[in-house]
Image (cartoon, grey):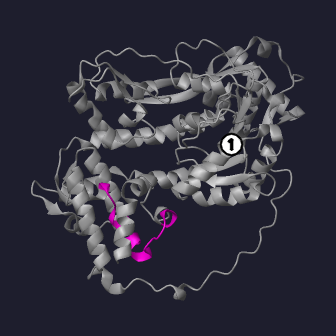
Amino acid sequence: AKRTPAVVAIDEAHCISQWGHDFRPDYRTIGQHLPALRPAPVIGLTATATPLVQNDIARQLGLSAPRRFIHGFRRHNIAIEVVRAPSSGRSELARQILAPAERRPAIVYVPRRRDADSLARELNREYHAAPYHAGLDGKRRDEVQSAFIEQRLEVIVATIAFGMGIDKPNIRTVLHTALPGSLEGYYQEIGRAGRDGAPSRAILLHSYADRFTHDYFYERDYPDPSVLERIFQLLTGEAQPKEAVQGRSGLAEEAFDTALEKLWIHGGAAVDYAENLSRGTGGWRELYVAQREHKLAQFEHMLAYCGNSACRMLSLVRYFGDEDDTEGGCGICDFCAPSAAVAQAFRQAGQGERAQAARILEALKKTDGLATGRLYSQVFADEALDRRGFEDLLAGMARSGLVELADASFEKDGKRIDFRKARLTPAGRQADESTPVLIAVEVEAEAPPKKRKKAAPKKPKAEKAPPAAVEKTQPSAMAETLRAWRLAEAKRRGVPAFRILTDRALAAIVETKPQTTRELLELPGVGLGIVEKYGAQIFRIVAQG
């Protein structure tokens, strides 16, 4: 207000867009403050914005025909490998991949905190490794980070969801032991490798079974629109207590809170600081359905990337719309240079498979540029090869330079339908049944996982007194104090109380009475941001009882 800024720079600008991989509703308010800061120029900065996200950032910030600088997505020194591997043996496979000293320092991404702890223990038997996730207190995270940067630690094992603030130039390997939720997040994570420009490697271990984990979290975090509609129909122009609406909805508390937050974000519900609810606008449906579908599409793009039969780096460059990049394949990924792969394994096609490849080539000579689905149904109507085997063989033919597979799409009923086309290359026109074809195989660890030590017997649950049954109707003094504090904080910030702390998290605090940052972070609905903002106040209330 007193001194007009020279420039307004908004970092991590993808958080502004509901299409971004790390969307945060509070970032939506940035645009309303910009007119007061003009005539300062405004710049939005992000490393992971697709064209769709770029358009939304500009709209949310009120930028009229902004100039766009989209460049530098290609990393020439990172060799990417996407490896199909069963989940049961990935810990041992990770140990084998990182065994050579030249593949360390390394970051290993895992899906859950307990995976980070257990894998770090296993890796630490051979080289210095430690977990790094939101379940550790700030002091321990600082210790691990310092040790990693100062070369006293060779491997950090981190959760995919935890944003790492580590800028270490000589990371040689970034290894994912499970499928990320989006290409945006994946690209950001592999970008931590090789910032010194030296050869580095990004290896992703995955299988189709990973999808079930993502499906679970998707259904939990993005409920069916009918669930939001049920709440919307219970709301009126008059404010009602949240508990009353929840009771009439028939939804469990956690499911209700998730749906209410989505309804509030998209304007279908008005929620005051005391969590009194009233009806918002009816336009929430289209917005929410679009966001839900986009979230699912992000994961579908991740799955498609794993199944791509093209240069790994070039596929990422195209995904982010880097029009300045006119280079072809990277020459170092598992598709461009299969003989140089360190984790991916290949085999030569057998005689029968080469004969099947010849059938595919003959079909393309007659009609080039066929959709792969139609190609399969035409060539293998006799079911001599199942669809999975066909896709593996076709990928091998692309890797061997006989065909080129390209993404295509068409519009149907207002929706975009994606598919792949297969085209013959000059080498494919000259090939016959004697032409070698290199097929990728599922990779397993060379040795079975080591036997786990017998777990110590758990202490009987009776040693820990269960919460008093009367707490539901007669809240404890601690619960009342926490609710009063939450209400005051929500009023001060002008947001609904659940944006400060959910009812589920509040109940967990009352039940467990956390004494440390780590104990607090272990509770459902409590993240690092909550601990950093409110941890001291929560601990003070717990201490007072």
**471 or 86, which lies in front?**
471
Please determine whether, in this image, residue 184 is positioned above or below residue 90.
above
The reply to whether residue 120 is in sight is yes
Q: Secondary structure at mark 1?
A: loop
Please determine whether, in this image, residue 392 is positioned above or below residue 357.
below
Q: Measuring 42% from the left and 74% from the top, which residue is drawn there?
A: 513
Q: Measuring 17% from the left and 57% from the top, which residue is drawn there?
A: 235
Q: Measuring 53% from the left and 48% from the top, which residue is drawn there?
A: 162
Percent from the top left, x then y, of residue 536? 38, 62
Percent from the top left, x then y, of residue 301? 54, 35
The N terminus, quarter of image:
top left
Q: For residue 38: magenta?
A: no
**Pointer 1: what residue?**
150
Count all numbered tags in the image, as a single digit: 1
Magenta segment boundaries in residue numbering: 499-519
Magenta highlight: main SS? helix
Percent from the top left, x then y, of residue 401? 77, 20
The C terminus, quarter of image:
bottom left
Left or right? Give the position of 147 relative to 349.
left
Question: In the picture, residue 190 is in which quadrant?
Answer: top right
**80 or 144, which lies in front?**
144
Q: For residue 509: magenta?
A: yes
Percent from the top left, x then y, of residue 421? 61, 23
Density class for disc 1 (Cα within 10 Å; few <14, some 14-19, many ≥20) is few
Q: Measuring 78% from the left and 25% from the top, which residue is drawn there?
A: 337
Instruction: Name the residue type under label 1.
Output: Glu
Question: In the picture, residue 372 is in which quadrant?
Answer: top right
Question: In the picture, residue 302 is in which quadrant?
Answer: top right
**407 or 266, which lies in front?**
266
